[in-house]
Amino acid sequence: FAAPLASQARHSPQLFPDYVVKRGERQRLLYTPREEGGLVEFEFDFNPRYRYLLRPLGVHAGNSYVGITDDDEFVAKFGRWQIRTPLANIAGYQRSGGYRWWKAIGIRGSLADHGLTFGSTTRRGLCVEFIEKIPALVAGPSHPGLTVTVADVDGLAAALESHGIGER
């Protein structure tokens, strides 16, 4: 058994639950943001029902997070895909949820508004709206917004609020 490298340990699949409801009830974990090395991380809310859809993309809890750096950058990593932009490029955010699985799970581009989604659940998410569009990850139009389905939507909203970014 070898100890993981520091870079591997930072994004280990270990989650940080605040509590777990009693056995027999539907299990629900609440997560706290993790601060490490100048990055406040928010884990994605991986619904077990959809993990088999994300596995072929190489997306799992160990390599997916949303973060805010000490250098005032917004970072969203979803498997091998990553978005980085200065916090100054964020116009605001919106909470949303109750998505249909075929519109939310995986990496999705919207035909309606050209927004991008990093989706791991249908429950809840936060759409971050950009002042200047971010470049497309794959061929296509640039993206005016990014929806992320983090476990702690309210915590991510509060972190953005603490940097002067409000709800729209």
Image (cartoon, rainbow, N blue to C red):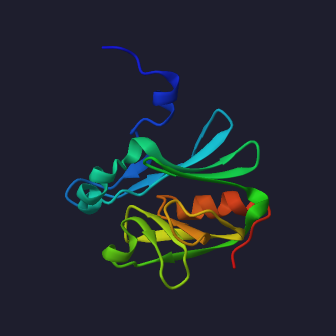
Is residue 69 visible from the viewing direction of this image? yes
Q: Residue at x 37, y 71 (%)?
A: 122
Q: Residue at x 61, y 59 (%)?
A: 156
Q: Residue at x 58, y 64 (%)?
A: 154
Name the image quarter holding residue 157: bottom right
**Whether residue 73 is situated above or below residue 49 in the rendered picture:** above
Which quadrant, please, contains the C terminus? Answer: bottom right
Residue occupying the far top of the picture: 1
In this image, 87 relative to 33: left or right? Answer: right
Q: Position of residue 141 (x, y in %)?
A: 57, 72
Is residue 26 visible from the viewing direction of this image? no
**Whether residue 57 is situated above or below residue 69 in the rendered picture:** below
Which quadrant, please, contains the N terminus? Answer: top left
Which residue is nearer to you in this view: 140 or 4? 140
Name the image quarter holding residue 126: bottom right
In this image, 167 relative to 107: left or right? Answer: right
Residue occupying the far front of the picture: 139
Across the whole image, how many numbered discs are drawn on residues? Answer: 0
Q: Position of residue 80 (x, y in %)?
A: 45, 47
Q: Position of residue 93 (x, y in %)?
A: 65, 72
Name the image quarter holding residue 129: bottom right
Residue occupying the far left of the picture: 24
Q: Position of residue 107 (x, y in %)?
A: 42, 63
Q: Residue at x 39, y 46 (%)?
A: 61
Residue occupying the far bottom of the picture: 112
